[in-house]
Image: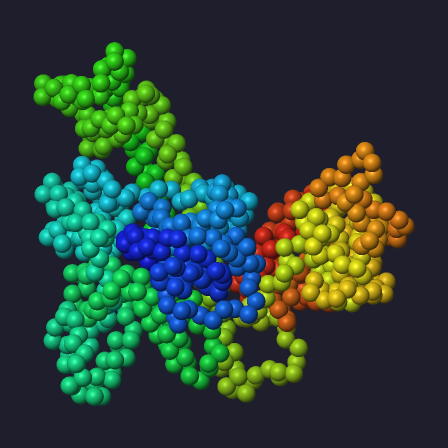
Amino acid sequence: MDRKRELTSVDLTALVAELNGFVGAKVDKAYLYPDSLVRLKLRDFDRGRVELLVQAGEFKRAHVSPPEHVPDAPERPPDFAKMLRNRLSGANFGGVSQHGFDRVLTFAFEREDESTEIVAELFGQGNIAVLDETGTTVDCLDTVRLQSRTVAPGAQYDFPSDRFHPFEVGEEGFAARMADSDTDLVRTLATQLNLGGLYAEELCTRAGVEKTLAIEDAGEEEFGALYDATQRFASALEGGLDPRLYYEPDDGDDDSGDERNESEEDDGDEEGDEDAGEETRAPVDVTPLSLEEHAELRSESIDGFNAALDAYFTAIEGADSEDAGGSDAGSSSRPDFEAEIEKQQRIIAQQEGAIEDFEDQADAEREKAELLYARYDLVDDVLSTVSEARAADFGWEEIEARFADGAEQGIPAAEAVVDVDPATSSVRMELDGERIDLDTRMGVEKNADRLYSEAKRIGEKKQGALEALENTREALAEAEQRKDEWETNGEREESGEAEDDSEPIDWLAEPSIPVRMDEKWYERFRWFRTSDGFLVLGGRNADDNEDLVNKYMQPGDRFLHTQVEGGPVTLLKATGPSEPSREIDFPDATLDEVAQFAVSYSTVWKNGRYAGDVYMVEPDQVSKTPESGEYVEKGAFVIRGDRTYFDDTPVGVAVGIACEPETRVLGGPPAAIRPRIETAIEVEPGRYAQNDAAKTIYREFRERFRDTSFVRKVASPDKIAEFLPPGGSRIVED
């Protein structure tokens, strides 16, 4: 049995109430670890220190943990963690909610100056987004741009489309949803009612119905029993939890469904018990309730679902580490290709299932629309009847009663009406066995158009899912290729054909490049290091310009700007922000590179020109104080005194990928960038928009590197775009 690595919608429903028991706890600090793990260190008045873990990577989970179970803090926090600390330090935890019945949790934090929400998407490839009080995304771990939704910094956050909620529907709606399916009971519960395989089987067992019974052979009795079982299950999730850890049964267990009595077990054979203990330390599932479907497994009752989740994930993390350490004793540095391949295969299966669901849903909406036209007169009769009755001030109860009377009299239009919903001004009709909700404020044609539009919207979601599926298949192929190449290289080394370690590494030809990246404080700005090693910073906007001058400019630095308006503030740093200022005689090569940087990221480039004038001054010549009667806009400054000019400075930008000592995208003046990177692409003013040019460069890098997954990790189009000038560009042909 495969171990659970992701929490289900049912798990999250049970978890929310427990997590809300920590409302009022104050945030001390935030951390970000690899594999999308966010840790929030909290202080609770009654419990003391509380550690909240939220992970959206290979493991998808959320729970509190004792301090001894949290990983050590990273040496240097990345920008995402810094942003969290800035927004959450001293904030009160305001509670957590689940988005409908989806695997999405929203954590609310409140502070006098601002409110913040952290949205954890615990489905698919996972994501964590941070929102301000308006619902705008401040930052996110992964940018998502699909036709159906967008998750990107600066954009309004879009939640996934609402899923059907099996715990909040009435008995008629539950039965109608079941009856709409064309498969068996258990698969309908798992997919159409979004309960997943395990809990779908559990509800069938609790309801006493045959799991594989086809929907067309089921009736009110089966649907009623399943509805009752679902309601009892939902009630237990709200207040009667019985959290359990489940383990594979030991060989020779007579009754694996009973809980273990450790004192009796110890009386047995020591060697056999030691082997059993190895199994005990590796649970295979954790659930908020005791499940009949797991009756054959050994179980352990845990006080509190949070505690159960912590115990479970702590145990399987340790088990994974042991498996990784012992699976290939002769090669401890071997990447875990199998886990990556299995992960991509699992994602592909989920995406293919989602695509199939989208196809079925779109077909169903189109069929409903076609039914409206096929039974036009009947539908029009119902809609007209309701419209006329409402115009005559008839109440909805009276309208429903008249339809009931008409059905008893055998009037076809009345017989076709199944239900009336005053809240939405709609009626539900059954046409040729298909139930369709109709807006009585619209005619037949507009109701059909609404259904066709919904089919189109679902089709757009399918297209986005197809694109994501293609990317995942590509990632799977790359992982399989890296595994084959690693094993081939290993055989070559064993036969004495290993390459000489003293030779320079040809990173372009390497089958697998390790990612080594350390976030720097200055990466929020445009930046590069000159060929002489000096740090250069440039503003991306007016706010950056203000910060560079007010917070980071020190005596000894140099301030550069283009002669024309519309350029970034450019700082040539003599020292770091925490170092004492000092005067430096900057080399001419450095000054030329900084001038080229200043002109390249200005309106000179945006206007399609290939050269411009740049001036340089000392920090004490830069002021925010205007002359009498004048006004200085945000991001602009007054320059007084003599200036040093760099006339007709040519534009020029190169973008490349560095592989050592760190792996990252670098960009800036070609003379400064080329010595630091493995391969570079130069650009010049052109007609391709910034994002389009970035995608073209990304594809070119994928052609140059053998390890294409490395390019995707460190040099995505978004990261490349950060180093491209505003305006159009094109690649300079070699």
Classify 171 as above or below 388: below
At a point 70% along the width and 54% down the height, the residue shown is: 551
Q: Position of residue 79 (x, y in %)?
A: 57, 58
Q: Position of residue 462 (x, y in %)?
A: 40, 44
Residue closest to the far front: 45
**Residue 630 appears in view:** yes
Q: Position of residue 189 (x, y in %)?
A: 22, 48
Nearest the viewer among 56 and 252 is 56
| Quarter assignment of residue 449 | top left
At a point 55% along the width and 64% down the height, the residue shown is: 77
Does residue 612 appear left or right of residue 663 in this picture? right
Classify 467 as above or below 632: below
**Residue 201 appears in view:** no
| Quarter assignment of residue 697 | bottom right
At a point 54% along the width and 87% down the height, the residue shown is: 496
Does residue 673 appear left or right of residue 39 in this picture? right
Nearest the viewer among 604 and 498 is 604
Residue closest to the far top: 392
Does residue 676 appear left or right of residue 236 in this picture? right
Does residue 637 appear left or right of residue 251 in this picture? right
Q: Quadrant location of the C terminus? A: bottom right
Q: Position of residue 61 (x, y in %)?
A: 37, 60
Q: State the count of labels.
A: 0
Q: Quadrant location of the N terminus? A: bottom left
At a point 21% along the width and 67% down the height, the residue shown is: 301
Nearest the viewer among 560 and 557 is 557
